[in-house]
Image: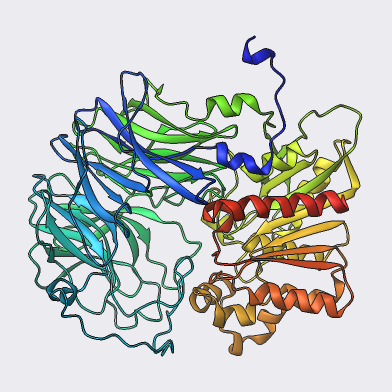
Amino acid sequence: MSRSNVAKRSLVPEDIYNLSLISDAQISPNGRQVAYIRTTLDKAKDDYRSSIYVVEVAGGEPRRFTAADAKDTFVRWSPSGDRLAFLSNRSGKNQIWTIAASGGEAVQVTDLPEAVTYLAWSPDGSTLAFVSKLEPAQLEKAEGDAKAESTSDVVHITHMRYRSDGTPGFLDNKRTHLWCVPSAGGTPWQVTSGDYDDARPDWSPTGQELVFVSNRTAEREYNTVNEVWAAHTRGGEARPIAAGDSAHFGLPSWSPDGSSVAISGNEDPAGGGSTNDNVWIANAAGDGRRNLTRAFDRSVGESFAGDTSANSNPGLVWSPDGRWVHFLVSDSGSVHLCRVSAGNGDVALVIGGARRVQDFSLSADGSRLAYVAGEALNPSDVYTCNADGSDERRLTAVNRDFLDSVALSPPEEFSVRTYGEDGAEIQCWVMKPVGFRDGQKYPLVLEIHGGPHSMYGNGYFNEFQLLAARGYVVLFTNPHGSQGYGEQFTKYTRAAWGEKDLPDLMAALDHVIAQNYVDPNRLGITGGSYGGFMTNWVIGHSDRFKAAVTQRCLSNLYSFYGTSDIGFHFGEYEIGSIPWEDRETYVRLSPITYVREMKTPLLIIHSEQDYRCPIEQGEQLFVALKKLGREVEMVRFPNESHGLSRGGKPKHRVERLQHILGWFDRHL
């Protein structure tokens, strides 16, 4: 019997174990093969496993290239195409390994006491640059000669940045620096040093220098500056390429002729959280830069909010002739690949459509692209096309068998005019329940994205599909503050969180209710991070919802400033002031101020090691609602960070989904 004649089953939370995630599509220099990373969730080990696969551009069955019981990530072809370098934790912490393009056993290149977080081949393939917290003394220390380390568990903090979400415990005092190592193995040498963190190196065409991202301003502990510097590969004094107190740059990529460096960013003196990131060309001599995409009015990079991806952040890629710089851009619910002329700044769409391009690479001669893309009903696969976007071919179908076996709900796009003062149109999507029947009324769950400057859109979202499978209408929108609609749209909610985006959400909700298939007495609401903030805000300003789930939320802007790993700069930028200088605004925009108006039954989901929106944000809301005698429960996830929903332990990810479904089932 053909699969089309087999009844499809409903999706369940445990189905995340059946999904494979694709990332890091790297086309070989000759354009004939694509290496990529395939990540799976290991139920038995409650962990993730990643392997390198290779597929021919001409088509055929992909072959698994590495099979260690480990996480092999960040794969890169050597310039000659004869070897692949990658990062792997198979020996413990992430180290550099290489493997011949013809196959065989992988060879460990580095064996260091600190993890490696980034790598880049030199133009001649003889050397690998990498990023690590490695310190020279760690290399020099002789075996058996280690000094006795302190057994005290007391933490003495002197720096403002002492925690970082996703990093257990407290930050050490070590800095990330650039190092080099022979690609065949050998003793590494240090390229950069000092009381700075250096990242994302890219080689000059001559192989003599590395360009990289750093913050070397005097006030670096307090600001959000990202500068671009260059250093000789054998060390010495670094020199600025794009620096200064208003520099917010990254993704440096040296031009093929060595005369300039492409960078992404902005020069917003306030910090640039909602300011468009543009593509710039900086002179390699460090004596000037120009903004190529000023008139484009879209921010460079991916801002997509999802729960099933393994992004690799590809950065900026030059064409070999130096005419074009390629980049990803979030635009109206999709993520596209564009290229901008290095000469006149004209932007051309290369890969468009209602989908999410997640990463990409270009062949050595510039004729062929490889990329990972996903759609509403498929998380991700590997594709290839010509440099102008023509001759597109899909090279993998990693989730085809599983996706063919379950019933999914295709999102339906619509737009609605906001109730807000500017009357703008808002892009929205609705997913009908699996098995939808005309004439029947269904409960609805409104989903709100985080950021606040991220974006929902044309990608697979597992949580939404689960709700649709359970019989809910799912509504999701991109209200004011979202990326993808121009800088002014993104900045609209600054110093007006909740106040200026609530009218958008209500307009979208009323539009769907007017279609006459939603029961207005069975409405639910949920969201995470800023979406958790908005969930709290909405139920403090409306009694329309009969159940709410607030996830990794923010409830008190005043305490967020002093407890979040980004609160002291992010909160200041978004609210436009410091708490003790503008207490009124911080109190006015804090959802907990309106706790007495919160009557909606609320489930609070929070991770105990969430340093982005610390768990005290959920705790104080829980206690306040309990004190008021409201229906509220709290679910705490130990040893999880802010990223639980997309990168937490698989078992916890399943349990989180079960709690969400259970709460809505109970109340709706």
Quadrant (top left/top right/bottom left/bottom right) for the N terminus: top right
Can residue 577 be spotted in the picture? no
Could you say where residue 247 lies in the image, as x and y percent from the top left?
33, 68
Q: Which of 248 and 667 is in front in this view?
A: 667
Percent coordinates x, y for residue 2 in the rendering: 62, 11
Question: Which residue in the rendered view is the most extreme toward the top?
Answer: 1
Figure label count: 0
Q: Can residue 166 be seen in this view?
A: yes
Classify residue 614 by image quadrant: bottom right
Which residue is pictured at 13% across the width and 36% down the height?
80
In depth, the one of 592 and 297 nearer the eye is 592
> Relative to residue 481, is residue 380 depicted above or below?
above
Q: Residue at coordinates 36% horizontally, 71% vertically from top-left?
A: 225
> Outermost residue toward the front?
144
| Rendered residue at 45%/66% (across/down) | 272
Residue drawn at x 80%, y 55% is: 663
Percent of width and height locating residue 536: 74, 66
Q: Nearer the viewer, residue 564 or 619?
A: 619
In this picture, residue 489 sits left or right of residue 299: right
Q: Is the image coloured rainbow, by chain, by secondary structure, or in one colour?
A: rainbow
The picture quadrant where one finds residue 339 is top left
> Along the line of sight, which residue is nearer the eye, 606 or 319?
606
Q: In this view, does 160 lie above or below 228?
A: below
42 to the left or right of 278: right
Q: Position of residue 486 (x, y in %)?
A: 53, 51
Q: Say whether residue 580 is left or right of residue 136.
A: right
- With 661 as the anchor, is 643 left or right in this view? left
Quick check: 418 above or below 240? above
